[in-house]
Structure formats: structure tokens, C-alpha cells
Amino acid sequence: MGIKEQIEKLRDELHKHNHRYYIEDAPVISDYEFDMLLKELENLESLHPEYAHPNSPTSRVGGNVTKSFSSVNHRYPMLSLSNTYSLEEIQEWILRVEKSVSNVSFVCELKYDGVAIGIRYENGEMVQAVTRGDGTQGDDITNNVRTIKSVPLRLNNGFPEDFEIRGEIVMPHKAFEALNERREAQDLPKFANPRNCASGTLKLQDSSEVATRGLDAYLYYVLPEGVLSSSHAASIQAARELGFKVPLKEDRFIAQCAGLDQIMDFIGHWEEKRKTLPFDIDGIVIKVDDYESQQELGFTAKSPRWATAYKFKAERVPTQLNSITYQVGRTGAITPVANLEPVWLGGTTVKRASLHNSDQIELLDLYEKDVVFVEKGGEIIPKVVAVDRAKRTPNAEQVIFIEKCPECSTPLERKEGEAQHYCPNIDHCPPQLCGRIEHFISRKAMDLAGMGAETVQLLVNKEFIRNSADLYSLSFDRLIELEGFKEKSVQNILDGIQESKKIPFERVLFALGIRHVGSTVAKLLAKHFKSMYTLAQASIEEIVNVEGIGEVIAGEVYRFFREEKNAAILDALVEAGLQMEVQEDLISTVSSPITNAKIVVSGVFEHFKRSELKEVIEKHGAQNVSSISSKTSYIVAGEGMGPAKLKKAQSLGIRILSEQEFIALLGL
Ligand code: IVH
């Protein structure tokens, strides 16, 4: 046998053993024997680089470094799924589908909580793996996906010449916990949950690091439809034969369901059993099985009509309150945080949860050492939602909100009508100093890449900086003095500072961190006043006159510019060369039928992404608002606007524009 044949034979064997181990869970050789075969192959490949192949089993260990992931157009858009938390709405969806398609049958699957991926195969070889991205374009993360052992690099016979399979890359709990333990030991920040961890891992430049992290993949969608079989369930079965790790009937990860009862059964089963799974799921996906029926139902702009997802409600678990810490934000706002007896919730160990403010503590009727219920909403930080009073110890003391700042001991203040307490020691309270600078450098503001919270804290501690303007007088010679700072990181910081001078005016305004001036308000002000100078000169009345700005905001803005120390910071920022005026193209020159209107955008659209639609609205001199009120001028309603919104709009007599009507109104 020649070298080439020998290499091929080894590769073949190793692919088969890999499949037996990671997909069938039935290895026939020991790990040691596997490693020996792999070593042999590695040896031959290094002696004969002319026979190298990207899909060789040796690529599983990684080694490729991707400097930046290139963007790839998806052949088929990568859509999302409509979803609901309500079983009633699932029932309605089933009835709707049954009405529009005769003899329809369904497939239920787990809704994997991971990172969506599309993997292309040509002639049985994996050629490319791409993330969802914006649905049209994603990142090419092929090298990283090659290291995931359950993704076949080469398929068994019977494959179509060119096709794509999609699925979800997940981080199993065991791998997640192990990684976080390693990171803790190395003093690295831990991942908040397995999904973030999977997503962070896939974006690593070094694929050999990816290889160590234990990612797994479940594949659930073959494209083009019909390339393997005439129905979804049959295609998944066929994909299994080709060597893919697909959801199995035996595990009840997938089931064909005739109708409502069987679907509800499947949902009920996993609602209860999901905690026993070795990875996270966040719901159940229900799909129409056969492709012809799928085609009849078609797609909306955003998601297929032939599938929907039932999402599990946030899980709630009891645990004990150990203590409360009070955090001080950049504005001086005090946030109470509950320190809890660690408890497993939705894929992570929870040790802390938000208590929001003193009203919330009162509302919960919280006592020291109470048993509390914790829930995870959409956000990463869990919250305390209730107290188990029956478990309260007899002599427990009620939790009383602090009166002094935990960082600088200044007596706290609370303004009329506000829920939050504040530390008024704006100039010297350390977390306020750092917080303001951290806000200034954040991505949505000045985007000072190369710098993070720790660097800011260090620079403040060392008294290199006291405010954002001081950043612009940092020099290479000073920064290089700092412990742990190498030439490259110092240069990165300085480059970031230099680059930030190009950031447009409205973001500079946002970066200043004026209370209540978020990025939307900053845009409104920038558009109206056009320069920092005119805004700084404006009276309260002039500021209130801007559409969308109320008295509270106007008051804060007015006060901000009248404080001497702010004026000094601003002078220094002007001196540093930051953008203090609007660039012309931001100023809307179009006079349009919607000038000054307040518009709510709801649902999904055929011709625009929501962000595009909002941009059009702004360009035509109107303002995007997020909730419907009597002040709303129009609602632009796309597919899937919720019934509650519709009712509210109708009751307030607000004009609802369809996408077509909106286009016609503006003559687009
Ligand atoms: S099918 C055209 N099946 O959930 C849509 N998606 O929130 C095809 N997901 O975009 C998707 N488990 O990333 C499908 N069994 C499953 C899934 C699943 C998780 C993800 C997928 C999807 C997202 C929607």
C-alpha cells in the first residue's frame, strides 16, 4: 500500500471510530488505541504535507487561527421562528394550519438553546460552516466547527452532491461547568450561561482552544427541502444515515404527532423533564412534516408559517437570602443586590439577583435570611420575585434600605417621584467616577476598543484620570509604566482614543452621560441643536420645545451645561478634537407628511428590516417611540402585530398604516 492509501485508510478508520464514539455512543476501541491511530496519521501527514486535507480527523484538534471571520452570504436566508409562551396560541396555530392544509401531520422537536449554524457539504465533505449573522450574511467559522466531534467532516455514502444542514451548536452543562471552573482558577471572567459560552467559544480565533471546550451540535434542518426525502422527519432520519447527530425518536428528542393531543403531550413531557437533559433547551418547536404542506403555508418576512415555537416560562426556584449588597452606578443610583445561597437555575448556578430598589424590597416584604424565589427573565441577571413567608425564622429582622452610600458614606437622597436612591457625592464617590468614564468609553458611546472597566479602575486608582477628558492626555510613556501593560496593549488603547475623535456628535453627546439622555434622546437633541455650543446655550424652554423632550430631561440637560466642572470637561473635549457638530447628512432636509410625528413600529415587514424602517422614519423627520399612547401619531403595522397592541391603538383612535400605506404615504 502506498503512503497516500495508508493515509486514506487511517482517515477512514478514524472517521468511523469518531462516529461510533460521539454519535452512536458505542465505541469499539479504547481511547488509547484511538489516540495511537491519530498519532500515526499525524506523523504520516507531517512527513507528507502534499496529502494534507482540511477534513482529516487530525483537524479535530484545531490549530488554525482565524484572524477575522469572513462574511458569507447565506444561500437560503436563515430565518427565525415565531414563538409564544401560551399553549392557547399554540392550539390556535395548530387549528390555523389544519384549516389551510388538509391531512397535515406535525413533528415536535426540542428547541435547543445554542448558536444556530448552517453547514455545507459538497461531495460528502464538509466545506463551510456559517453563523446566522443577520440572517442574510453570517460569519465563516468553518475551522472552529471542524473541531466539534459530533459534526461529521466526511459523510457516509448516499449523500447529495451539494446541500446544507442547519442546527444548533450547544455547550453541554458538564463542559460548561468544567470550563468555568478552569476559568475561575485562572482568574478569568466566567461565562454567564451555556449559550453565551457556546457563542463566545465559536468566535475564538484559535481553533485548538475551541477543540478543548467540548461543544456539541444537533442538526435539525436539511436544505434545499426535499434533497434527502419528501418530509422533514424522513430527512432527519436520512441525515442520521449519512452520519449526522440528529435528534432521535428513541430519546423523544423528536416525535411525529398527528394533532393537538400528541403535541400537547410532547410539550408536557419536556416541560417536566427538561431539567434532566445534559444541555439547555428553551422550548419546543412544532413543524409541519411534509414539504408540500410546508410550501403551501410558506413564509412571512421573518419566519416560516409552517413552524412555530412554544417557549418555556422562566423557571423559578427557592433559595436562601444570605445578605444584600448595595451597588453604586455611574449616576450615583443605588441598586440593591441579593446574595443568595447558590442555586441551579436554567443552566447556571445563581448566586446573586437584582432587587431593583427600596420599593421592591418593601413590596416583597423582605426579611433577613428569608427563603426567596428567583426567576430568570430574558435578561441574564435573575431577579427575586417572591418570598416564602411560611419559612421565615421567628426572630428575623426586616430588611431596611441603607441610608448612607456604601462606598463613600455620604447620606443618600431620593427625589420626589423617583424609585431610586442616589448618592449625591458625584465628584468623589469612586464608582461614580469610574462608571461615568466606563459609560463614556462604551461601545454605543465613544467605543474605545482596547479598554475595559478594569483599565478604567486602574487609571482612576493611580490618579492618571479623573474624568473622560483626561483620557485624551494619556501618553505612551505614562501608560507603559503600569504593571502588566505591554507595548501592544498600550498602543491599542492610544489608537482607540485617536479613533474616537471621529465618533459623530450625537454619540459624543450620549457619551457625556447626562442623566436621562440615552442614545435616542441624544439623537433628538443633536438633530435639533446641531452643535454642542448651541445646545449648551439653550434655555429650558428651547429644550422642551424639541419634540420628544420633556421637562425632566430638559432640566437635566440645562443643569449639566451650567455646572462649572462639566464646562471644563467639555472645553477639554473640544480641545482634544472630538466631534461637536452634526455631520450634514444627519440633518433631515426632507420635509414630509410625517414631520414631527411619533410613530410606533410593530411586527415584521416585507420590504424593510425593522431597523431600516426606523431609519426611514427618522430621516423623514419623525420620531420612533416604543409604546402606544395618546400622543402616538401613527402605527406602522407589519405581519404579526400583537392583538393587545391593536386593541389599544383602536381604542385611542390612532391611525394604523400597513407597510404598503406607509410606502405610499412617503412616496418611497
Ligand atoms: S427550525 C426556518 N428547529 O431557534 C426556521 N430551529 O428562535 C428553521 N432552534 O432560528 C429553524 N431548536 O436557531 C428549528 N429544533 C429546532 C430548533 C431551532 C432551536 C433555533 C434556531 C431558530 C431559533 C428561533
Image (cartoon, grey):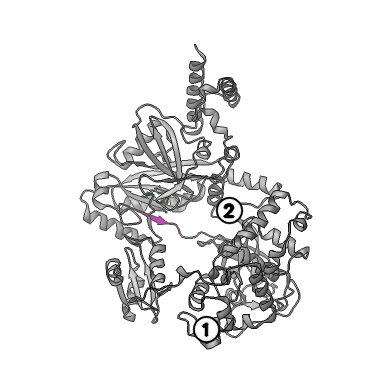
Badge nearest the viewer, 2 or 1: 1
Q: Is residue 335 visible?
A: no
Out of 642 and 639, give the one closest to the viewer.
639
Q: Residue at x 35, y 30 (%)?
A: 159
Residue hosting label 2: 348
Q: Secondary structure at mark 1?
A: helix
Magenta part mainly helix, strand or loop? strand
Q: Which residue appears farthest toward the left when viewing the image?
A: 102
Q: Residue 298 appears at what percent x and percent y?
A: 27, 52
Q: Secondary structure at mark 2?
A: strand
Instruction: Tell me if 92 is positioned left or right of 569 in this view.
Output: left
**Mark 2 CB within 8 Å of ligand 1:** no
Q: Amino acid at mark 2?
A: Thr
Q: Which mark is drawn over residue 543?
A: 1
Out of 487 and 383, give the one closest to the viewer.
487
Q: Residue at x 71, y 79 (%)?
A: 403
Q: Residue 13 appears at what percent x and percent y?
A: 49, 22
Q: Which mark is drawn over residue 596?
A: none
320 is within the stretch colored magenta: no
Out of 559 and 314, give the one closest to the viewer.
559
Q: Which residues are magenta?
A: 308-312
Q: Which circle's residue, 2 or 1, is located before the other in the chain?
A: 2
Q: Amino acid at mark 1?
A: Ile
Q: Is residue 556 visible?
A: yes
In the picture, residue 517 is in which quadrant? bottom right
Quadrant (top left/top right/bottom left/bottom right) for the C terminus: bottom left
Cα distance between the residues tagged 2 and 1: 46 Å
Q: Is residue 509 above or below residue 239?
A: below
Q: Residue 276 appears at what percent x and percent y?
A: 51, 47
